[in-house]
Image (cartoon, helix red, strand yellow):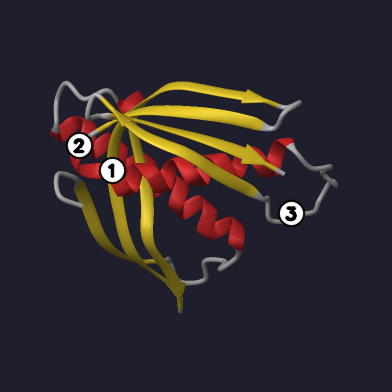
Amino acid sequence: MDDGFSYRFELQLADGAETSFKTIKSVKHDFRKAIRDDYAESFLGSSVASLFVEFPQFMFSDGKVVGRAVVMSMVVMSMKYDPLTRTGRMAVCLNGGQFEETRKWIRKNIETLARDKNIALTTGEIPPAAKFYLGREELKDGNVLEIEFKTE
């Protein structure tokens, strides 16, 4: 990442803390909020609503969380999805130096859409992996990434 903002971190969970999936999810949620708030305070004028925090590196072992968090500044310009044809398009205005991170973020959100909208859900069970295909990708005006996709 060329023009981004990232944290490398190592967090030690309190002694006796439960090491479940729920705990890890909670740590990510709380840490994501703290990073976003810190970024907004450090860079006045940035809108918290346009900030997204991703974890390209995140490992949990022996009560310790180690990784890297990346702050991305972007605005979702449009999101269109037709459940009948199972095709869609997402356009995001991004920070020029964060093309690859933004592309990964879009892909993750398309995967979530495919998983949550196109399969029968069973209470208490994690949905199976979703299948989707990325189509045309276009960078418009140097800072709007538009990606077409199809889900199965």
**Residue highlighted by disc 1:** 99
Mark 2: amino acid: Gly
Say whether marks 2 and 1 touch (CB < 8 Å): yes
**Residue highlighted by disc 2:** 96
> Relative to the observer, which residue lies in front, 147 or 46?
147
In the rendered image, residue 74, in percent from the top left (x then y), is placed at 31, 30
Left or right placement of residue 17 versus residue 100 in this view: right
> Relative to the observer, which residue lies in front, 1 or 151?
151
In the rendered image, residue 126, in percent from the top left (x then y), is placed at 74, 54
Residue at position x 51%, y 46% from top? 108
Mark 3: amino acid: Ile
In the rendered image, residue 143, in percent from the top left (x then y), is placed at 25, 29
Element marked by disc 1:
helix
Within 10 Å of the Cα at label 3, are there few (<14), some (14-19), or many (20+) other Cα atoms? few
Left or right placement of residue 41 versus residue 144 in this view: left
Residue at position x 51%, y 51% from top? 26
Query: What quarter of the picture does the C terminus occupy?
Result: top right
| Vertical order, 11 against 104 (above or below) | below
Quarter of the rendering containing residue 11: bottom left
Within 10 Å of the Cα at label 1, are there few (<14), some (14-19), or many (20+) other Cα atoms? some
Residue 126 — which label?
3
Q: How many marks?
A: 3
Number of the front mark, 3 or 2? 2
Residue at position x 14%, y 25% from top? 44
> Relative to the observer, which residue lies in front, 105 or 50?
105
Number of the front mark, 1 or 3? 1
Element marked by disc 2:
helix
Element marked by disc 3:
loop
Residue at position x 75%, y 38% from top? 118
Mark 1: amino acid: Phe
